[in-house]
Image: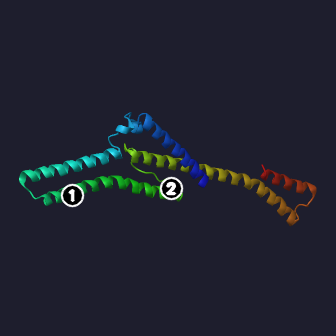
């Protein structure tokens, strides 16, 4: 299972590297778009930048109100801190909730549940890219596990026939139905040779 996991992660990682390469030197095609990665309006960097700008505007606006209405500075400071904290909490929840889900799905995959998938792969930001990579890795691992099970089933079926025939020959010899003559031993030998193929 560890080799299958390594192969799947290698393929998923190479896909992510390719996406990063295209995103740095070309355009981002995530979600069918063609906009440059550096200018994605929904990226985490853009959201954090917007948070800083909004916080500055709120603080500046409250200070201007304080100067015009002669409101005490301490009240303005408290209001600006509360507004900034509320906005920060809203943005932080939007960032941490998908990460918590990815962590839960990744733990399930690590325990062999390859049917788990991460939602939000259609997001147009870095978290959407990460969700897509995790889902591709899960697809690869699920396919590897299915092929492994099919291989084990086929091998088990191929082994049952010669083993059953060999057992029948040996039981006949033990029960006295057949003598341990060269012909009987040759039949048993042929069945063992089938096991080596």
Instruction: Kindly check if marks 1 and 2 are in contact, taking CB atoms under 8 A apart as contact.
Output: no
Residue 168, picture quadrant: bottom right
Residue 53 x/y as whole percent: 25, 46
Q: Residue furthest bottom?
A: 175
Helix, strand or loop status at disc 2: helix
Mark 1 nearby-residue class (10 Å; few <14, some 14–19, many ≥20): some
Q: Residue furthest right?
A: 181
N-term-proximal mark, 1 vs 2: 1
Q: Residue at x 41, y 34 (%)?
A: 27
Helix, strand or loop status at disc 1: helix
Residue 83, picture quadrant: bottom left
Mark 2 nearby-residue class (10 Å; few <14, some 14–19, many ≥20): many
Q: Is residue 1 visible in the rendered structure shown here?
A: no
Residue 123 x/y as whole percent: 37, 45
Q: How is the image coloured?
A: rainbow
Q: Residue at x 89, y 60 (%)?
A: 178
Q: Residue furthest left?
A: 69
Q: Residue at x 79, y 51 (%)?
A: 196
Numbered circle sitting on residue 109: 2
Numbered circle sitting on residue 181: none
Q: Nearer the viewer, residue 119 or 19?
A: 19
Please indicate whether residue 70 sits to the left or right of residue 49 in the image. left
Numbered circle sitting on residue 81: 1
Please indicate whether residue 152 sits to the left or right of residue 30 in the image. right
Residue 79 x/y as whole percent: 17, 57
State the quadrant of the N terminus: bottom right
Q: Residue at x 30, y 46 (%)?
A: 49
Total numbered labels: 2
Residue 77 x/y as whole percent: 17, 58
Q: Up-down: is 192 above or below 29?
A: below
């Amino acid at each position: 299972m560890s080799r299958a996991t390594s192969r799947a992660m290698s393929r998923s990682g190479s896909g992510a590297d390719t996406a990063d390469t295209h995103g740095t030197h070309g355009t981002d095609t995530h979600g069918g778009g063609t906009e440059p990665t550096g200018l994605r309006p929904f990226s985490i960097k853009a959201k954090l930048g917007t948070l800083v700008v909004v916080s500055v505007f709120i603080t500046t606006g409250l200070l201007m109100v304080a100067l015009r209405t002669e409101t005490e500075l301490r009240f303005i400071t408290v209001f600006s801190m509360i507004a900034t904290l509320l906005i920060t909490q809203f943005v932080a929840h939007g960032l941490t909730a998908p990460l918590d889900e990815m962590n839960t799905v990744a733990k399930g995959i690590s325990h062999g549940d390859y049917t788990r998938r991460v939602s939000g792969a259609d997001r147009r930001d870095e978290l959407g890219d990460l969700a897509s990579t995790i889902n591709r890795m899960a697809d690869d691992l699920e396919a590897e596990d299915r092929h492994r099970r099919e291989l084990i089933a086929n091998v088990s079926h191929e082994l049952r026939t010669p083993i059953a025939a060999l057992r029948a020959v040996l039981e006949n010899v033990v029960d006295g139905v057949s003598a341990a003559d060269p012909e009987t031993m040759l039949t048993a030998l042929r069945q063992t040779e089938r096991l080596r193929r």
